[in-house]
Image: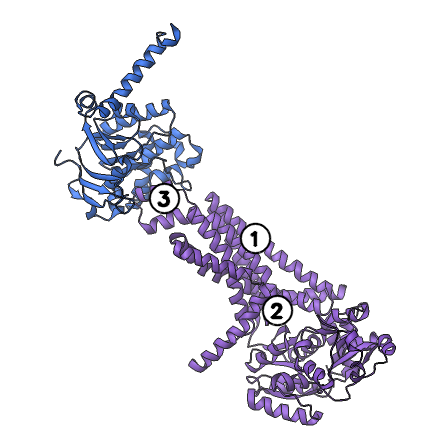
Amino acid sequence: MDDRFAAAWRLLPGYLGQHVLLSAAALALGLVISLPLALLAARSPRVRWPALAIASLIQTIPGLALLALFYPLLLAISSLTVRAFGLAIPALGFLPSLSALTLYSMLPILRNGVAGLTGLDPAVLEAADGVGMTAGQKLWRVEIPLAAPVAMAGVRTAAVWTIGAATLSTPVGQTSLGNYIFSGLQTENWVYVLFGCVAAAGLALIVDQLLGLIEAGAARRDGRRMLAGAAGLVLGTLAALAPFAEAGGPAYVIGAKNFSEQFILADVIGDQLKKTGARVADKDGLGSAVAFRALASSDLDVYVDYTGTLWTNVLHRTDSPPRQQMLAELTQQLKARYGVVVLGPLGFENAYALAMTAARAHALGVRSIQDLVPVAGQLTLGGDLEFLSRPEWAAIRSAYGLSFKAQRSYNPTFMYRALEDGEADVISAFSSDGRIAADHLVVLTDPRHAIPDYDAVLLISPKRAGDLRLRQVLLPLIGRIDVGHMRQANFMVDRDADKQPPEQAARWLEAAVGLN
Amino acid sequence: MGGGIIELQDVGKSFDGGRSQAVDGVSLGVAEGEFLALVGASGSGKTTTLKMINRLVQPDRGQVLVEGAPAGGLAAPELRRRIGYVFQGVGLFPHLSVAENIGITPSLLGWSRSDVQARTLELLDLVGLPRGYGQRPPSALSGGERQRVGVARALAARPRIVLMDEPFGALDPVTRDTLGGAYRELHERLGLTTVMVTHDMQEAILLADRIAVMRQGRLIALGAPGELVSGSADPAVRALMDMPRRQAERVRSRLGGEGPGHG
């Protein structure tokens, strides 16, 4: 508990700074777009109706989906700009998060801005004309000051929403306070989840209070209050961004997919790089396909992937050649097609496998996937969030002609729970998972070799292909990590009792395999 | 009335694309120094007529001359800064102090800060408000005090013409009477030309030099109060003009104990 709290605390400056940067930029952009639009909409019913309708519609899209949608959208735009100007747009990280959050912030600002401007006393507006104000003077001296308190209430709502929704930017590769929540959820580290929630809520509260000060100042025409609120916001933002100022040189961006092993390995890579004085940035919790595309477009510099995954998902191959041949072909193809460097295998395999509890497997007499075929009609298959839509599952199904009674998707952590509780009879397990041994699971053999090999390999982005420092740091990792050590490190994070944060497991793994 | 400081020549206005005429061919001159009351029932077009003088309403046809020049020759804000306007709903800016409200037109005209300040104090004196009121928000004032500020705001940039749209309509009778009398005094003292819209015949008779009666967008009578009572060809106008007197007689008889209920 104390370890996890201390580890969470150490991560705070980086996460908070990124979170503040993202929220502040999205809110500022939202204001710049929404306030003039509110003015236009207040003046013209023809603009008002569609503007409010579109903003409301955007609000109905779940925040995570909106963020996710910007990834393919920006990829498409990027491919257009590459063709037109030879300039790529990063589709991952800050830009999609900023775009989605900006859209998300618009409705309250727009709605309150319009309400503030259209709700003004007509007698006061006529008086503004009558005393001889021009349209511009009327706007700045009468309409804006009188609408400001209502509009500010909208800005406050937008700020609270944006800060909350910014935690969802973690899966599209933008570091935020959501990193605590997503990695905590994956590793059942509830201290992290709680820490992330409290930090995001605290930030939202503070910003809300400062904006409230500006709102009260605007309502009471109290310049000092407005100034105090604005100064608080500016100083707070600067303070949160301070950690970035001292950094020098571009950082190595290390990617991680959304499970413990990836968090641990990313931390090992980061730690090794930091020991040489390099700066490191993390993009955690990425989806499989997202991670490779991000590397190919150099949004990531390095991450660990698995040969079988690359073989089926990236090269779209359905065959399953011997291990060495697959690695050689992958290395050659990824370099040729994407400029991605396959530096080498880490030394262990994390294959997709089907697993059952020993008791259940024994009762049904199941030892291989082949044995499942006659009984599958009475069984429920639990897959992780990706498995059921992955080509590996399609390959197994067609190779054996498997058909289950039901199929359910789980977050990897909850999948093991489901198996234990009998909610699922068979799950898609990972062969390097510490829980296989710990939970006494039986991994079903694959006599038809439908599932390819999944050797963990280090991948380097095209941009860093010629980076000698990176290669020098990473080469000692090649062939260094055996499956026993990896399982144990994974288990340190995944187990229920004496749970460790991924950083601790990474330190243990480094020591265990002699990396220093 | 040729050569008046305000001249309306056959002005007309429709708010529904010509199906009905809010103001229908009104011609009217106001002499310098005159106090003219525009009276008529609701919807008779009196407020629209008033607003066409400072272009708060743009006439569809006809011409408006102000101080001898077409009102359309100036940008509307510039015209309005030269004409004081007292609003029906007072229309003080709630986010500005009393002093800032009074000083708004001078500051729009680019007066120096000290000139605006001096003028504001002068006007508070003129409309009979304590100087200390200048720093208060309008919401801290009574209805009568607010309309005094409204009058002060209209006079701030030393206009020669003041337009008033039912200025005292929302006030209690005592305050209305006091303020009406006080304004008439200012009108004399400052040599103003005033056009006031009112639906209160008694107020019109007590304050105005001449009364213009409107009905359904048309000017149906124009003259000094006494002329209209006796000389108007229109019996409706005579009845309208005569009403305050009949009311006064009834009031007197009831107060004197000779009313029908006390026999």
Report the disc number at residue A125. 3
Q: Mark 2 points at which residue?
A: A170
Q: How far apart are marks 1 and 3 (CA)?
A: 31 Å
Q: Do labels 2 and 3 share a chain?
A: yes
Q: Dot 3 falls on which chain?
A: A
Q: Nearer the viewer, residue B142 or A366?
A: A366
Mark 3 belongs to which amino acid? Leu
Image quarter where the C terminus of chain B lies is top left
Q: Dot 2 falls on which chain?
A: A
Q: Residue at x 48, y 43 (%)?
A: A220
Foreground mark, 1 or 3, reads 3
Q: How far apart are marks 2 and 3 (CA)?
A: 47 Å
Residue A367 position in % (x across, y down): 83, 83
For marks 1 and 3 on the same chain, the one whose residue lies earlier in the sequence: 3
Question: Mark 2, residues whose alpha carbon is within 10 Å: few (<14), some, or many (≥20)?
Answer: many
Farthest top residue in view? B263
Q: Mark 1 points at which residue?
A: A208
Q: Which of A57 and A153 is in front in this view?
A: A57
Asked if A46 appears above or below A278 in the picture, the reply is above
Farthest left residue in view? B2
**Quarter of the rendering containing residue A336:** bottom right
Colour in which the image shows chain A = purple
Question: Mark 1, residues whose alpha carbon is within 10 Å: few (<14), some, or many (≥20)?
Answer: many
For marks 2 and 3 on the same chain, the one whose residue lies earlier in the sequence: 3
Asked if A9 appears above or below A247 in the picture, the reply is above
Label 1 with label 3: CB-CB less than 8 Å = no
Label 1 with label 2: CB-CB less than 8 Å = no
Q: Which residue is drawn at 63% across and 83% down?
A: A313
Q: Which of B116 and A216 is in front in this view?
A: A216
Asked if A77 appears above or below A468 in the picture, the reply is above
Mark 2 belongs to which amino acid? Thr
Q: Distance between the residues labelled 1 and 2?
A: 23 Å
